[in-house]
Amino acid sequence: MPRGLDLLAVDDLQVGYGKIQVLWGVSLRLAAGETVAVVGSNGAGKTTLLRSIAGLLPPVAGRVVFRDRVLGRLPAHEIARRGLALVPEGRELFPWMSVHENLLLGGRLCAERLRVAENLEWVYGLFPVLRERRRQSASTLSGGEQQMLAIARALMSNPSVLMLDEPSTGLSPRVVESIFEVIAGLAQRGATILLVEQNVYLALAVADRAYVLERGRLTLEGTGQELIEHAAVRQAYLGVAEG
Ligand SMILES: Nc1ncnc2c1ncn2[C@@H]1O[C@H](COP(=O)(O)OP(=O)(O)OP(=O)(O)O)[C@@H](O)[C@H]1O
Ligand SMILES: [Mg+2]
């Protein structure tokens, strides 16, 4: 089916590290307003996929098309400037800077000053704990707060696509729940999100559509609900033995 509204299209992407190929022809689509998840186990290539889309890893073959333009070998900062924001797996905050300063750095991609102030209010509203801690250095935040700050920093640039790499990693279930509530809220309000997660149930529950990535290849695709109900997904990822 032709999908005229794709914001992001990944076509036959092949990516590797030196001689080791990790992604073997990955193709996916993301329409405006959609939340799409890519789920898969450890080492499947999820981070490699997001880093490659963000321009941090050059593809061996294939292409990434964003807003009808091939990204090619554009540098990562230029891709970010065009509206593709990555919240990286390791969060990559500036540890000695305050929460507020980290957010302002996220907002530097945003041309208008007025917009920066508005966005600050918006992200502090999404994560009130960040407002309370705005003068603290990022290194003093808890893991969950750091994840919130990483997401908030990405939102400061009003990205047209928000890419999240394992926002649940290393966090307690309660914190994960509150972060996913925010993600679900953004999705409901029309944000376009590409979410990569090992926590398959959480990701499928929030996603409109999802893909399963196994050893560098997409093996299944469906709505979040279809995949939650899919026997192979239930067995391999949700720990449900089918009777
Ligand atoms: N810098 C690197 N150099 C060489 N190989 C790498 C590098 N980074 C990742 N790999 C390899 O590429 C494969 C995919 O790794 P990747 O980090 O993309 O997986 P992932 O799905 O994000 O895993 P996880 O769920 O653990 O985050 C793995 O086999 C990994 O060992
Ligand atoms: Mg990863």
Image (cartoon, helix red, strand yellow):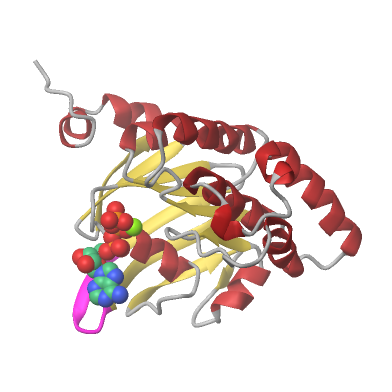
Q: Residue lying farthest right?
A: 114
Q: Is residue 185 left or right of residue 228?
A: right
Q: Is residue 95 left or right of residue 52?
A: right
Magenta region: which residues? 17-25
Assign the magenta stretch its main secondary structure: strand
Ligand 2 quadrant?
Answer: bottom left
Q: Looking at the picture, how far across and down is residue 52, in whole percent? A: 42, 70
* Image quarter (top left, top right, bottom left or bottom right) of the C terminus: top left
Residue at the image position 23 percent from the left and 48 percent from the top: 41
Residue at the image position 74 percent from the left and 44 percent from the top: 131
Q: Nearer the viewer, residue 191 or 180?
A: 180
Magenta segment: does it hold 153? no
Residue 82, quarter of picture: bottom right
Q: Is residue 1 left or right of residue 158?
A: left
Q: Looking at the picture, how far across and down is residue 146, in whole percent? A: 54, 51
Please say if 188 is above or below 162. above
Residue at the image position 54 percent from the left and 32 percent from the top: 178
Q: Residue lying farthest left?
A: 243
- Is residue 4 something one can see in this rendering? no
Q: Residue lying farthest top?
A: 243
Q: Nearer the viewer, residue 33 or 106?
A: 106
Residue at the image position 22 percent from the left and 36 percent from the top: 237
Q: Nearer the viewer, residue 134 or 241?
A: 134
- Is residue 21 something one can see in this rendering? yes
Residue 108, quarter of picture: bottom right
Q: Looking at the picture, how far across and down is residue 140, in whole percent? A: 56, 54
* Image quarter (top left, top right, bottom left or bottom right) of the N terminus: top left
Magenta segment: does it hold 24? yes
Please say if 51 is above or below 57. above
Q: Looking at the picture, how far across and down is residue 130, in whole percent? A: 68, 45
